[in-house]
């Protein structure tokens, strides 16, 4: 029996005309001659052009079941019938192209081509058809491609004319289009953002770079890692065999020169902060990144969040190579040494020092990396375990649904017929105390480190509502007041009360609420419990799986917080974009989402309940799942002074000359720190325009960038209202730069949000 084939999903990269030809059916379709009429197709297209929307969808009323999906944007690509030129949606939406084929005709209408991916499909064969398999088929496909290219170029010409006209209006748009080369100042000593040239579908890259250009600390910390900077690896005990170990001396050296991506990134950041008026061409950085990651050098549109992750990882890997080459040199080798010629003991030494390099917080990680704490509690013995997880940004699913809180009491009632868990706890308390001491020893470092920093990306569909869940866990469970209960309260308690969501609310706060909510892991999601396994009477011992509660909280908040709103998702086996507006604000308090354990960190004040961040960058995506345009809103503020107490948000053991940069009284909160002034700008590639903050707040955000703020003691305890720092917002679309009001920013359909920590 032949396996039934399904129409390819145009969203699949492997189905593209560039990469999928070799996978298509090489045998010639026998239906081509009867199902193809070039004359009729050309006549139809000359009248209507290539449509972007399905006419049948616009004529048919929305189904009741689809009304709840109005915030989703499904596969919008169309299929054109090669017999008559009818254009309709595919199986990713309402299947109007399939219905057209199924409608009785006197002639065959089995052949169609996707006007986005250019895949050819035969309904009679129920399979792909190679467009090159027959000359007449290739001719009609090439004709349609040419028509599409002509339409796109005409549309681009219109857009360019609009930008050119806008760029000549200095009072209205303040465009940087063709201004003479000079330093542009917008008052208060603040430099206007520079537009970036669009090199062909590179707006995804430009929008992220504009936000990185306004990111505090980043350029300064990169410059501290230049060639000749001294470093020291601590060395330590290395086990070469099971019963044999050697003590490695500390290894000292000086860093080598920057590698290509680090060098060009620093150069690009300097250019973006230079205040020059002319549009900057970022080709050098994009080429360096594309040479290492070819997917970004193919001239196609990509996801801005994906670009950000890969860029930061590329910088980290290049930085690590600089240290590892010094290690090889100190041990008498070079990067060109054949690994097979290195002895086993030397190999282990290289690996040992290399691991210490991996555990270092390098430049970009000092700015963006935070730590989550994942707390698990067994529902049977109430044993608590926790693990630190690292992130460079937080990915938040977009949802307004509020599910009922999880009651652990139900789980306990199921276990009522089992031996007393409290008797087990009492008998094993001494052993657990010993285990806890060992665990504390492992977690005693100020800033835990990892060789592979990852971005937390947690689905919240089964998460429960906030404060009620906390109460159920703490009040409805009969627990001994021992180490585990104290341990659980320390890790699962928050600095501030849980955020209370309104009915139907969809905001950054509600998304964070779901992200940090407690969930019950049961059924197939049960977790292994070490304590229950130890207490098991089975011989040999088998791993015991139990229902458990799990919660993620922020332990160590970063100096700069990036929030990624997951607008591109898979829903009912279909890829779509979520267009729902997510409310966000210029000030964000992470106190309700931070573990109480964070109060032990030196960057926190005693009794601190607020962890404040200020929004300074927004990446917005307009368009659909197949394409669109990325723009950014950035807020221009004064640069952080080298004596600012906010430098305390950067890990102490990695910052050069920290003692000089910090004033102890300010770090303790004895002095009031004035908020920085600034302006918001809208940036679309090379277009730069100043905007009001209100406009930024209306963006359909995709990425949000926040910086952390430092304030006095009354503010960190919550006794004082903290205002968002003054400044100017700018809208930037590639080379177009225009000042905008804050209200416009707040309406953006955000994709990425960038926040700087204030306290």
Image: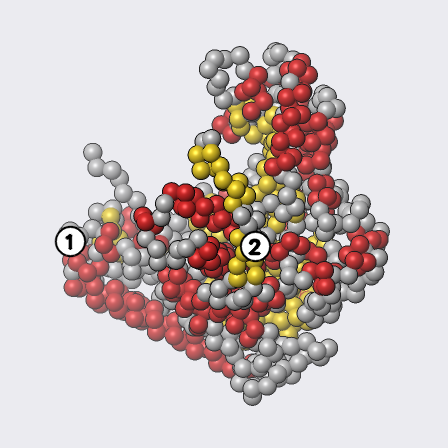
Q: Give the position of the C terminus as an image quadrant.
A: bottom right
Q: In this view, does 195 lie above or below 19?
A: below
Q: Quadrant of residue 587?
A: bottom right
Q: Which of marks 1 and 2 is in front?
A: 2
The chosen color scheme is: secondary structure
Image quadrant where residue 402 sits: top right
Residue 222: give x, y in percent of width and height: 56, 64
User: Compared to 61, does 138 lie above or below?
Assistant: below
Q: In which quarter of the image is the N terminus?
A: top left
According to the picture, the residue beneath numbered tag 2 turns out to be: 232
| Label 2 neighbour load within 10 Å: few <14, some 14-19, many 20+ | few
Give the side of residue 265 with respect to residue 4, left or right: right
Task: Kindly identify which numbered label has been placed on residue 28.
Answer: 1
Question: Is any part of residue 220 visible from this angle?
Answer: yes
- State the residue at coordinates (61%, 66%): 220
Q: 117 or 736: which is nearer to us?
A: 736
């Amino acid at each position: 029996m032949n396996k039934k084939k399904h129409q390819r999903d145009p969203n699949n990269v492997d189905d593209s005309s560039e990469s999928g030809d070799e996978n298509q059916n090489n045998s010639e379709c026998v239906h081509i001659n009867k199902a193809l009429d070039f004359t009729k197709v050309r006549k139809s297209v000359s009248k209507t052009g290539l449509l972007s929307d399905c006419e049948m969808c616009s004529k048919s009323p929305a189904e009741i079941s689809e009304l709840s999906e109005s915030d989703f944007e499904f596969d919008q690509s169309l299929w054109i019938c090669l017999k008559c030129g009818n254009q309709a949606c595919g199986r990713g939406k309402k299947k109007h192209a399939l219905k057209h084929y199924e409608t009785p005709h006197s002639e065959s209408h089995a052949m169609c081509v996707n006007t986005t991916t250019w895949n050819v499909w035969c309904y009679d064969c129920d399979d792909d058809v190679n467009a090159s398999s027959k000359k007449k088929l290739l001719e009609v496909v090439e004709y349609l491609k040419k028509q599409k290219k002509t339409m796109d170029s005409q549309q681009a010409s219109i857009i360019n004319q609009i930008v050119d006209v806008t760029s000549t209006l200095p009072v209205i748009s303040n465009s940087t289009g063709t201004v003479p080369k000079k330093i542009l100042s917008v008052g208060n000593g603040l430099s206007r953002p520079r537009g970036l040239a669009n090199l062909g579908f590179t707006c995804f890259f430009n929008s992220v770079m504009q936000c990185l250009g306004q990111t505090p600390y980043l350029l300064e910390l990169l410059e501290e890692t230049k060639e000749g900077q001294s470093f020291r690896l601590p060395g330590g005990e290395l086990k070469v065999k099971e019963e044999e170990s050697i003590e490695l001396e500390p290894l000292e050296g000086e860093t080598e020169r920057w590698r290509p991506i680090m060098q060009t990134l620093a150069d690009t950041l300097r250019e973006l902060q230079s205040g020059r008026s002319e549009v900057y061409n970022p080709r050098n950085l994009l080429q360096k990144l594309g040479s290492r990651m070819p997917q970004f050098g193919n001239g196609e549109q990509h996801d801005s969040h994906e670009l950000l992750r890969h860029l930061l990882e590329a910088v980290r890997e290049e930085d690590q190579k600089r240290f590892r080459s010094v290690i090889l040199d100190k041990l008498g080798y070079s990067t060109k040494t054949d690994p097979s010629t290195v002895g086993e003991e030397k190999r282990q030494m290289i690996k040992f020092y290399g691991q210490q390099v991996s555990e270092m917080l390098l430049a970009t990680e000092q700015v963006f990396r935070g730590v989550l704490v994942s707390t698990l509690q067994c529902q049977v013995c109430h044993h608590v375990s926790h693990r630190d997880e690292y992130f460079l940004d937080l990915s938040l699913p977009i949802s307004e649904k509020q599910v009922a809180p999880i009651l652990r009491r139900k789980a306990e009632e199921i276990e009522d017929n089992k031996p007393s868990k409290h008797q087990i706890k009492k008998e094993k308390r001494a052993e657990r105390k010993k285990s806890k001491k060992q665990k504390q020893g492992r977690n005693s470092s100020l800033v835990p480190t990892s060789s592979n920093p990852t971005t937390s990306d947690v689905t919240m569909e089964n998460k429960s509502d906030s404060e009620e869940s906390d109460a159920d866990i703490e009040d409805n469970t009969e627990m001994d007041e021992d180490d585990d209960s104290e341990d659980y309260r320390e890790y699962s308690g928050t600095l501030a009360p849980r955020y209370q969501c309104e009915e139907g609310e969809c905001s950054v706060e509600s998304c964070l609420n779901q992200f940090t909510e407690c969930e019950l892991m049961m059924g197939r999601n049960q977790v292994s419990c070490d304590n229950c396994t130890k207490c098991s009477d089975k011989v040999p011992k088998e791993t015991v799986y139990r229902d458990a509660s799990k919660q993620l909280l922020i332990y160590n908040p970063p100096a700069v917080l990036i929030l990624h709103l997951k607008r591109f998702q898979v829903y009912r086996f279909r890829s779509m974009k979520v267009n729902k507006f997510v409310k966000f604000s210029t000030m964000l308090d992470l106190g309700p989402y931070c573990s109480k354990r964070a109060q032990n960190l030196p960057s926190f004040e005693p009794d601190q309940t607020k962890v404040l961040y200020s929004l300074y960058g927004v990446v917005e995506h307009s368009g659909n799942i197949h394409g669109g345009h990325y723009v950014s809103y950035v807020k221009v503020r004064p640069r952080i002074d080298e004596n600012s107490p906010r430098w305390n948000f950067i890990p102490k053991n990695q910052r050069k000359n920290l003692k000089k940069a910090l004033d102890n009284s300010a770090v303790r909160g004895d002095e009031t720190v004035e908020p920085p002034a600034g302006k918001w700008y809208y940036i679309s590639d090379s277009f730069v325009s100043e905007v009001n903050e209100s406009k930024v707040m209306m963006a359909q955000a995709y990425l949000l960038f926040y910086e952390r703020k430092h304030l006095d003691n009354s503010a960190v305890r919550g006794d004082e209202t903290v205002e968002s720092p003054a400044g100017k917002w700018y809208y930037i679309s590639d080379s177009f730069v225009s000042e905008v009001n804050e209200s416009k920013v707040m309406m953006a359909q955000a994709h990425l949000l960038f926040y700087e920590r204030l306290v």
